[in-house]
Amino acid sequence: MSLLLTNVRPYGEGEPVDVAIAGGEILAIGAGLTPAEGAEVIDGGGNVLLPGFVDLHTHLREPGREDTETIESGSAAAALGGYTAVFAMANTSPVADSAVVTDHVYRRGQEVGLVDVHPVGAVTVGLQGEKLAEMGMMAAGPGRVRVFSDDGVCVSDPLLMRRALEYSASLGVVIAQHAEEPRLTKGAVAHEGPEAARLGLAGWPRAAEEAIVARDALLARDAGARVHICHASTAGTVELLKWAKEQGIAITAEVTPHHLLLDDSRLQTYDAVNRVNPPLREASDVAALRKALRDGVIDCVATDHAPHAEQDKCCEFAAARPGMLGLETALAIVAQVSVETGDLGWRDVARVMSEKPAQIARLDDQGRPIGVGEPANLTLVDPDLGWTVRADELASRSRNTPFAELSFRAKPVLTVLRGRVTARDGVAAQPETGARA
Ligand code: DOR
Ligand code: ZN
């Protein structure tokens, strides 16, 4: 199957060119290319061509909560969001703490074929924080687990975290930490500050995150291991990351689109769609996170796409589950807070949404330059489409988006995985095989 994308601007730079794709690779890039016999030709409308996005932090809920998301529905959401690879977090039911589960998630993702679904393996058995999971078995299986995380909860026991880091170094994998000292966040539902105090919501202090970031930087240093900080949310975390990187510690970090766009003033309505872990912080934190992304102190954007059922979100704030949808809105938000403000260019967007996450997870076929001979994992972004998020039009099985009815300019309009179109003009392709109702 071959494809000719005409009239596209790689990284949004220079005059439009054509990109010829065959055998899952980029065959040629240039002006006025002639389509190969039988090739599908797609007019790119002068839009911005980027490497396909890679999400290090997605919750797909399969196995266990298929009422809220499946590998199939989450894959469609990812393709529509411009993603060609996602990392599915381990807090499923059963937990992805064995190769049986991680290999299943990988295989199911390949069957669906809309995005590469890479399973994240749990660090501890059942996410219980007591005993290390069989990391080596998960890394060796067909699912080739490269990222381990107990996300949803923190690996809070320092001795266990130290052992996990030591193992991870010998396996060549990375531990992604949900940095939350649980003793400091018991009962907490919102950022600890004037807003939560006024609203009578129990507060989650910044120090709960920062204490773990500092601790794990030191543990990673001593273990000669790599640690990745999930959903960095405070200005203090940014300072600690800067310090740790200056020491030569192998620490990386992600920020979510919601922490780049929203702050705790959103809580005034008590709408639980705004409940998330870590919580929405203050405007000063948002500013520090945006700057850190620009400066490279925070390496990448990850969605923390966290689908939840209506009954778990449309309820009292303190009773709601934390989490918000992210895959289908991430690019629009990143463009709004960085490209449209002049903070970042499209080449930087390629770095923070594709190249860096692929490097952190050591994927060799994603986050590659747009060049001849490279894998055809690509996303075409219309920077000026103009669109409004409608919760009931999302491909996700859940509706918990805090961005409903917000308008954005940029949107992915075409996604290509190994030369196959997986989403186009807001419609995901049919799954490859094994589709389920
Ligand atoms: O808000 C969150 N939701 N944060 C997490 O760490 C877990 C996630 C989930 O699984 O719903
Ligand atoms: Zn988390």
Image (cartoon, rainbow, N blue to C red):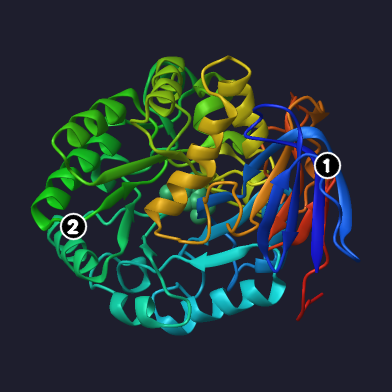
Residue at image position (53%, 42%) is: 353
- Circle 1: element type: loop
Residue at image position (51%, 22%) is: 263
The x and y percentages for residue 148 are 36, 63
In the rendered image, which quarter is residue 419 located in? bottom right
First along the sequence among labels 1 and 2: 1
Q: Is residue 358 above or below residue 261?
A: below
Residue 96 in sight: yes
Label 2: few (<14), some or many (≥20) within 10 Å? few
Residue 397 in sight: no
Q: Nearer the viewer, mark 1 or mark 2?
A: 1
* Circle 2: residue type: Asp
Q: Which mark is residue 259?
A: none
In the rendered image, which quarter is residue 390 located in? top right
Residue farthest to the left? 222
User: Gap between marks 1 and 2, in whole Å?
Assistant: 60 Å
The x and y percentages for residue 295 are 37, 24
Q: Which mark is residue 157?
A: 2
- Circle 2: element type: loop
* Circle 1: residue type: Gly
Name the residue beneath numbered marker 1. 32
Q: Is residue 317 above or below residue 285?
A: below
The x and y percentages for residue 47 are 77, 33
